[in-house]
Image (cartoon, grey):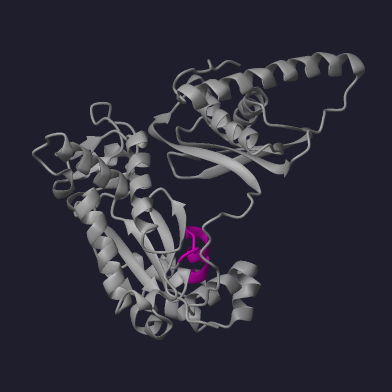
Amino acid sequence: MKERLIFHVDVNSAFLSWEAVYQLKNGASTDIRTIPAIIGGDTSLRKGVVLAKSLPAKHFGIHTGEPVTDALTKCPSLKSFRPNFPLYREYSTAFITILKKYAPVVEQVSIDEAYLDMSGLHYFYSTPLEAAEKIQKEIRDTLGFTVNIGISSNKLLAKMASDFEKPDKIHTLFPQEIAEKMWHLPVRTLFFTGRAAAQKLNQLGIYTIGDLAGSDPNFLQAHLNSQGITLWNYANGRDDSPVKETPDTPKGYGNSMTLSKDLTSFSEARPVLLELCETVTKRLRADHVYAQVIEIELKDKNFRRKSHQTVLDYSTNTTDDFYQISIKLFQELWDGTPIRLLGVRGGKLTSDKIEQIQLFTETASRQKSREKMAKLDAALDSIQKKYGKDSVKRGSRC
């Protein structure tokens, strides 16, 4: 089996970097990457959460995900800018386009990061470092922002390497280097180790990745089930997952939104849920599939995540169905705590349209309504495809 060479490329503080580049191109005299600055909302409203931060902001102890009000307390002179997602998509596309010049297989895993399978490309570069430097330089010179690049023989270690010192750095983390470079790190920093798992491991006397790597896998499985074995393999640098240009067939379609300010009322949540439902169902319709499970997720201001779902006796991909059911699920789930994030997901997919089994009179009425909404969805999809997604909007209703 040939030795693999994998790069993980990650944009440094993507949202803030892209805003900085945009401002400089449009005549700004200050690079917001060099001052305490965040992406996260309007400081005059003193609402929202920190989505991205500059290095000077980090030096004030400001963290991604914390309330803007807390960040302002730490740094009263902090500059805050609202998110601009169309701009981010534009820069993300340009970023991925450059990466595809250097590797035959590029797996984009988020708007600002991707894996590159560089295996076999030693004929073109004297060392992996040379290839990484060329990628880094082209992105910096052409697009104006910096990236970190992690280099290893698998995706896990490449990802861990790219998270080492930032910004604008290149790091290697090959299997023979993990004892020196990775095992001293807190176990919470290991990929796939969430807060709850890290707390459990700490309770078991496991504090570093090295502690985890040296643990008995059967002991870990007894306390963390299958996740214990996965984490043990990761701590020992084991990962054979391939770099995939084409993602696997999805088990579900979902979308979530981190909000620029906390939602505190049902009336504020309704248009957000509608937008999320429209995005999800549009993807379902584009792929000619239907969902039998509808789920909503929320994260409140205390960073607690909750979800609620329902299983339908029919399948659907209409926006109205998703919206009406999401509203009901939301009302059942929400306890009134201000909301940071909302998400909607459709699961249990089928390529067949399964009709609801009801009494004849109810079926005829509801079937007619569904057919009408399906025609409306098709018309809106067609208009938005031709004239843009903002060319026509739905109105939220109960």
Q: Give the image quarter of residue 38.
A: top left
User: On the rendered structure, is 303 left or right of 224?
Assistant: left
Q: Is residue 216 magenta?
A: no
Who's the residue at 79% across and 17% down the image?
Answer: 366
Most common secondary structure along the magenta stretch: helix
Q: Nearer the viewer, residue 173 or 209?
A: 173
Residue lying at the far left of the rendered structure: 29
Q: Give the image quarter of residue 90.
A: top left
User: On the rendered structure, is 159 left or right of 125?
Assistant: right
Residue 180 x %, y %: 34, 83
Who's the residue at 61% across and 16% down the image?
Answer: 398
Q: Is residue 5 visible?
A: yes
Residue 66 x %, y %: 34, 44
Q: Is residue 51 above or below residue 202?
A: above
Q: Nearer the viewer, residue 9 or 47?
A: 9
Residue 167 x %, y %: 24, 60
Q: Quadrant of the N terminus?
A: bottom right
User: On the rendered structure, is 372 left or right of 177?
Assistant: right
Q: Is residue 146 visible?
A: no
Instruction: Give, as a single range, the part of the protein colored magenta.
Output: 191-202
